[in-house]
Amino acid sequence: MANHDYEKNHPEADNTSSGYSRPEREYEEYERRPRRNGEPDEDRLRREREAEQPNYDPDDSLEFSMQELPRRRRRRRRRHRDAGHGCLVGVMYTAFVLGVSMFLAALVIIAANEVFAFVKPDRTAVIELEENVTTEEVADILKEAGIIEYPSLFRLYCTVSGATFKSGKYEINANLDYSAIARTLRRTSTYKETVRVTIPEGYTAAQIVDTLVENGVASEEDLYDAIENYDFDYDFLDGIGDSKIRLEGYLFPDTYEFYVNDSAPNVIAKFLTNFENKFTEKLHERAEELGLTVNEVVTIASMVEREARRDDERAVVASVIYNRLANPDTFPRLQIDATVQYLVGRAPTADDLSIDDPYNTYLYDGLPPGPIANPGIASLEAVLYPAETSYYYYVARSDGSHIFSETLEEHNAAIAEVNAAAEENSEG
């Protein structure tokens, strides 16, 4: 809205009354007015400009030295070097922190594995603690036995957990954690005495039982009960036949570590597991190639074990048995003394050969009902890989070796030779 009152009260504001517009006239009047203590602004501005000019000495030289520039560059390069040094220090510090962190992490992992037994060897040891044994002594004993690796860590654990120990003998496995070790050492002694027993090849089940009883492994009654009646879960026991003693032939001869006064089924299971491991899949396949069951292989091998004393004759003795079995019309009976010996428990006499029993191969055709001993791996392999011969007879010399013959005439001559040698030795 226009300010009509102003125009009425100030007629000079009308810019049509002169050649200047109102703003121009006002600016001229402004320039003519004195400023700041009567000094016009024009003079003041000129004085201020003069004051701003540098006051040079006429003798001063305006020249400058270019040596200042390299000095500035050197300072810049020094700043670059300082920056690089700072980066290097930062990298080194970071590497140090990471290294320390990794080292501490490794220590934590090792300590955790030691205390909680995440990955530890499956190794047992027997330790004995005396009365009033200290934590330090227990830690040292466990270290020497290979149960723990860091005695100081075990001592710390015992201190924190307040573990206590009882005197006695303990059997401990290295794969136990610290808590389980401490609990074990607080109980009544868990140690079970062990005994090392060697069972020779060719031992009968009765001989094996006698040996185990003599070594305190288990009682005779319990052992026979396990052999005859316990339900063992092994495939090779299917079809074992009507053996005089059920597991005869499968109590694999070897050296064993038994607990004293152990459970009879546990003891017999060790023999059977060993047989299962020794009679490999390859031997199973070979038996099938020959058309034999496992029980037939073991039965023949038991006779070879009892008849052959020399390893180089086992396969030859096996060939004689096979040759007779392959010609039942001419050789219906094996006529092997070891089967009769199994009946009487000693070297058979002429009268023993007439005992009426299926194990008497002088009276009964073919193989006996079952094994007559527990053969080793050499006899089992000799049966599965017999020698190729035409022998049907053999007779033993005094040194355990044999004379093998193809005909009865040759066999009778061999018998005469052996008897003559025996007479000479007795006279000498």
Image (cartoon, rainbow, N blue to C red):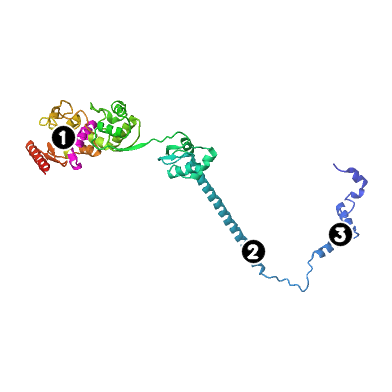
Q: Nearer the viewer, residue 104 or 121?
A: 121
> What percent of the width, then of the height, locates residue 17?
90, 51
- The residue carrying mark 2 is 75
Question: How many discs appear?
Answer: 3
Name which quarter of the figure residue 127 lies in: top left
Work out whether mark 3 precedes mark 2 in sequence or the reverse, and give the earlier one.
Answer: 3
Q: Is residue 19 left or right of residue 192?
A: right
Amino acid type at mark 3: Asp
Q: Residue at x 60, y 57 (%)?
A: 86
Work out whether mark 1 precedes mark 3 in sequence or the reverse, and give the earlier one.
Answer: 3
Work out whether mark 1 precedes mark 2 in sequence or the reverse, and give the earlier one.
Answer: 2
Name which quarter of the figure residue 265 lies in: top left
Q: Quadrant of the N terminus?
A: top right
Q: Is residue 222 left or right of residue 58?
A: left
- The residue carrying mark 3 is 41
At numbered mark 3, what does the secondary structure look like: helix, strand or loop?
helix
Q: Residue at x 54, y 48 (%)?
A: 101
Magenta extent: 288-315
> What percent of the width, then of the height, locates residue 425?
12, 43
Q: Is residue 19 visible?
A: no
